[in-house]
Image (spheres, rainbow, N blue to C red):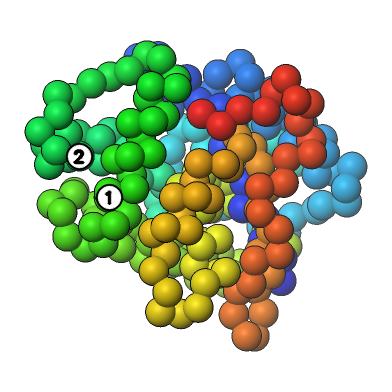
Amino acid sequence: MGLLLLIRHGQASFGADDYDVLSDTGWEQARLLGRWLVDTGTAPASVAHGGMRRHRETWQGLAEGAGWRDRAPVIDPDWDEFDHLAVLERHAVVTGEAIRHDADRPAFQARFETATGHWAAAGMDGGYPEPYDAFVARARRALERAAGLPGPGVVVTSGGVIAALAAVLVLSRDAPVGPVWTRFNTVIANSSVTRVIVGRSGARLLTFNEHAHLPRSLVTYR
């Protein structure tokens, strides 16, 4: 593979009936990223994305901006994000809190960070539909498969997946991933690029959360 670009999807539709649809801002972020990749000399030999609509639409916007309409992506559901609603609901059950659906972004973000922090700390325990350790293992499987594709490669996925892989790649083998994952997951920008080098010695993190293609007005995190 050589070089692998992990791209977080563009901004989804927070507060809408279908969160999985890109917002107008998300589409523009994707198109700008495509133009920037071409301007910086990126020409992927392979493309993959998760099975979510926001992954597919981000690839479509990116391909439009870059002029890469002839590239057929591999669809791999292991690149899908964890079910944040299931995590929030399970956390509410464990803590005895009422299940809330905050429309206010700061209120939602605070609750999201608390709930996902507890989910990550629980590992394989806690009664979550997808335990945190299983989620990390799934992300690692996706990376291993992508590493077998022709390089350089582009993968469109989600922030939680990228944060998990970044944490795995910067920590020693037996170090707990959860605390670092929570920090990475709160700062990764929509349509950002994280670069991973894959060689004989395995995968190594080269950069994290690049978003120089975005003007400040288009930098979003949710």
Identify the residue shown where x is 70% and y is 23%.
218
Quadrant in the rendering for residue 1: bottom right
* Residue 124 makes an appearance in the image: yes
Q: Regarding mark 1 in the picture, which secondary structure is present there?
A: helix
Residue found farthest to the bottom: 200
- The number of numbered badges drawn on the structure is 2
Relative image position of residue 7 (x, y in whole percent):
62, 46
Q: Is residue 42 left or right of residue 153?
A: right
Q: Nearer the viewer, residue 31 or 67?
A: 31
Residue tagged 2? 91
Q: Is residue 50 left or right of residue 166?
A: left
Identify the residue shown where x is 42% and y is 74%.
175
* Disc 2 and disc 1 in contact, CB within 8 angstroms: yes
Q: Earlier in the sequence, mark 2 or mark 1?
A: 2
Mark linked to residue 192:
none
At label 1, the amino acid type is: Trp
Q: Is residue 77 left or right of residue 68?
A: left
Relative image position of residue 170 (x, y in whole percent):
57, 69
At label 2, the amino acid type is: His
Residue tagged 1? 119
Q: Is residue 187 left or right of residue 128?
A: right
Q: Nearer the viewer, residue 4 or 205?
A: 205
Tag 2: Cα neighbours inside 10 Å, few (<14), some, or many (≥20)? many
Q: Regarding mark 2 in the picture, which secondary structure is present there?
A: helix
Identify the residue shown where x is 56% and y is 27%.
11
